[in-house]
Image: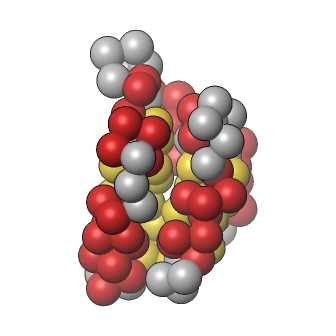
Amino acid sequence: MKIAIGVCEKINGVCSTMGCFRAFNNREKHFSIYENHSVELMSFFSCNMCTSNSDENLIKIAERLEGEGVTKLHLGACVVKCKAERTKEIKGIFEKHNISAVEGTH
């Protein structure tokens, strides 16, 4: 199974993202669903819907991920707690491209 992780761009310079990677590597927290599965992390990207005020960039990412066979996206806590309240929109973009969205990483 191929998966991706999406985080908020506003965490750049603040968050090391080690929590996401540790949870993925150890199949903990929201990644425990893959405990007995072969999983390939294909992408780790940042969302910029707030600063660009546009869906265009995420649509391009979703298209590329879909083309590479990614079927699941994990949204970091920073996206799930989106202060702009756009989590539902973000999930919708990926779900339109056959990528199910999981709220959470660690």
How many marks do you count on the picture? 0
Q: Quadrant of the C terminus?
A: top right
Q: Position of residue 45 (x, y in %)?
A: 34, 49
Task: Return the residue found at the far top.
Answer: 14
**Can the viewer see residue 87?**
yes
Q: Quadrant of residue 12?
A: top left
**In the image, what residue occupies the spot 46% across and 66% down?**
3
Q: Position of residue 83 (x, y in %)?
A: 63, 30
Q: Position of residue 11 (x, y in %)?
A: 42, 24
**In the image, what residue occupies the spot 33% across and 44% down?**
52
Q: Is residue 15 above or below residue 46?
A: above
Q: Quadrant of residue 89?
A: bottom right
> 11 and 93: which one is in front?
93
Q: Quadrant of residue 51?
A: top left
Q: Is residue 6 left or right of residue 106?
A: left
Q: Is residue 73 left or right of residue 2?
A: right
Q: Is residue 66 above or below residue 81?
A: below
Q: Is residue 40 above or below residue 15?
A: below
> 13 and 89: which one is in front?
89
